[in-house]
Image (spheres, rainbow, N blue to C red):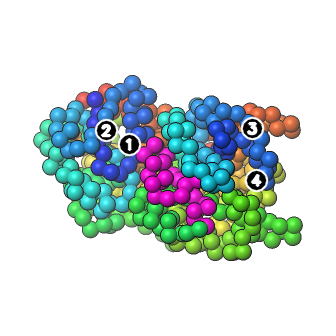
Amino acid sequence: MIHIVNYGLGNLSSIANIIRKMGGKSCIANHPDEILTAEKIILPGVGAFDHGMQQLMDKGWIPALNHVVLERKIPALGICLGMQLMCKGSEEGVLPGLAWFDADVVKFQIPAGQNIKVPHMGWNTIKIKKNIKLLPLTEQEQRFYFVHSYHVVCNNPEDIWVETSHGYPFTAAIAHNNLMATQFHPEKSHRYGMQLMQHFIEFSC
Amino acid sequence: MLKNRIIPCLLLKNEGLVKTLQFKNPKYVGDPINAIRIFNDKEVDELMVLDITASKEGKSPNFSLIEQFASECFMPLGYGGGIRNMADAQTLFTLGVEKICLQTAALNDLNLIRKMADKWGSQSILVSVDVNRNWLGKPALYSSSNGKSLSMPWLQFMKNAVEAGAGEIILNAVHRDGTMKGMDTELIKLAADSMDVPLVAVGGAGSLADMKAAVAAGASAVSAGAFFVFHGPHRAVLITYPKYQQLEALFS
């Protein structure tokens, strides 16, 4: 059973949909107590960084999340804003993040004169930097759906799982032990995302 | 490299899928759920569903139908038609829609766009700008809910919508709608050059070359209806979508 953290942001039904499609089981956790005994969690999120952190704080999620992720060390998958919240902080806001990764979130700085739009919105191909069970190490092209204006910068290069490019190369997914997070949306990325979710359903640390 | 998105645009009337010609004469082309399943199998980049009668008739979106669409879509889904307030938007996002598209409500009050962008982020709030050329070829802003041209300059309205927080603009050339005779690249260029957010161009695509021309004019994405649902000179209904390799070759 995968608990999807409902802190008021993010497209929960799309995530529940793809887990069901891949034969897994999920439930929406509406209260921090509900995740204390969870086997796995997904931290989704769409929206602004401070709004996300504020929601996590106001609803009392942070102690419960820290407990399951840092002490019980259950597998956790962050998606989009969920990935950014796992970092130390963001240029988008002033609140501190969950700081599960030694990483910061910065705004895209597209050099002047390049016809590249922000947000980075649409399908992009990825480059895998280290082997994590969720994505196959294949030479074949894999593509995912992105929509974001800020991106993660890791202080510890070993955390970098996937890179992609928009104006310049940037970190599109990070992973460290039980923690995995993607800037892209696997729940909206056809068979590439289905495969990733299938692997998360089967994943064990 | 980010790919230029090619987005089938499905028009909904009551609970059926239709296709219009210059925004008129909606012709029934099939069952929307069936169409969405086919587009899903074809791995389309994104899907846009527009209810063309909701605003006209002052109706709310058909939430139960949209929920079925969302549960079938393993790609981003946009929805437009009859969205009047924050509550409508909240319901749509909860059902699993990624992007909502507004026109009638945006023409009435751009503050609503501002509030929505503040709450859900610009990337989920689209404004659709319909532009019609009159018999002299002069472009004018067009209101799809009442079929009238408006006096406000279209480019100004588009810029105001972006300033209010729209994260994408859907530019529809009404005079090209359903004609499959090529896209209005002049309008596309004017629009793309006047703003920083992605532009989705729609209206008139009849070939992959037309789509390429729209991208060359500055569109980030191209949307089309007739191109994906009609086949051959007699416009037989057949759902198609180019293969990924074809699109990759087209835009490389």
Q: Which residue is mark 4?
A: B23
Say what secondary structure mark 4 lies in.
loop
Q: Is residue B87 magenta?
A: yes
Cα distance in 3D space between marks 4 and 1? 35 Å
Q: Earlier in the sequence, mark 2 or mark 1?
A: 1
Q: Which residues are magenta?
A: B79-107
**Same-chain status of marks 3 and 4:** yes
Dot 2: chain letter: A
For label 2, count other residues whose C-alpha is less than 10 Å away and answer few (under 14), some (14-19) or many (20+): some
| Image vertical order of residue A104 relative to residue A73, above or below | below
Q: Which residue is mark 1?
A: A12
| Res B193 visible | no
Q: Are marks 1 and 3 in contact (CB under 8 Å)?
A: no
> Which image quadrant is residue B102 in?
bottom right
Q: Secondary structure at mark 2?
A: strand
Where on the picture, by quarter, is residue B194? bottom right
The residue pinned by badge 2 equals: A28
Distance between mark 3 and mark 4 Cα atoms: 14 Å
Query: Residue A53: x and y, percent?
Result: 26, 58
Q: Chain of mark 4?
A: B
In whole angstroms, how far apart are the C-alphas of marks 1 and 3? 33 Å
> Of all residues shown, which one is farthest toward the top?
A23
- Chain of the residue on which disc 1 is drawn: A
